[in-house]
Amino acid sequence: MIARVKKAPRDGLPGTVASGMLPGMGLQIFGTRKCADTRKAERFFRDRGVAYQLIDLAEKGISPGELASVVAAVKSCGGAAGSAAGPAALIDTEGKRFKDRGLAYQDYDAEAEILADPLLLKTPIVRDGRKAVIGHDPAGWEGMLKA
């Protein structure tokens, strides 16, 4: 399944590139259509006229290269998730999926688990090039737009 690209109109011109976004740049939102926080992220960027690409983890998953890129972007931004090392910082340890799989009670390779089941990720993950914000964080999203 190909991830769909949503482009918000700017100045009444459908299909134009939103301000702050260069044609080669691409804001990506990793999440699911059922996730309320992912829908909030979509609404946040749509209301500001920012083009984005939604990658539905329930349909497409995440490739090893994308995962490495997201981990590097989160580390470069710092913050709570950035302070922890590696893909383990991206796992939603409070989520139902994590609990159902019993991962709290065993040692596991975080990268392998995420690649096998991308719904273990905290969502949304909003990535713009080398910057990424994990979870519902409107202040972080606003910071991405200003930078």
Image: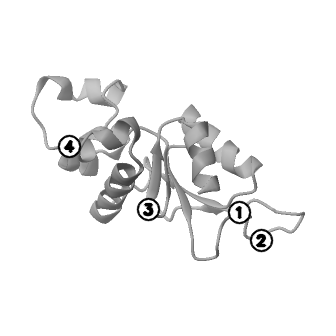
Residue 88 in picture, x, y percent from top left = 24, 40
User: Can the viewer see residue 61 in this picture?
Assistant: no
Label 1 to label 3, Cα distance in Å?
21 Å
- What kind of element bears circle 2? loop
Point out residue 32 in the picture as x, y percentages from the top left corner: 50, 43
Q: Nearer the viewer, mark 4 or mark 3?
A: 3
Q: Which mark is residue 7?
A: 1
The one nearer the camera, 65 or 102, is 65
Q: Circle 3 sits in a helix, a strand or a loop, which is it?
A: loop
Q: Which residue is mark 4?
A: 110
- Name above or below for residue 40 compared with residue 24: above
Q: Give the mark nearest the N terminus, 4 or 3.
A: 4
Residue 130 appears at what percent x and percent y?
Answer: 43, 62
Which badge, 4 or 2, is on the more N-terminal residue? 2
Are circles 1 and 2 on residues that touch, CB within 8 Å? yes
Disc number placed over residue 37 in the picture, else none: none
Q: Which amino acid is tagged 2?
A: Thr
Identify the residue at image location x=58%, y=32%: 36
Q: Which residue is mark 2?
A: 16
Name the residue tied to disc 3: 130
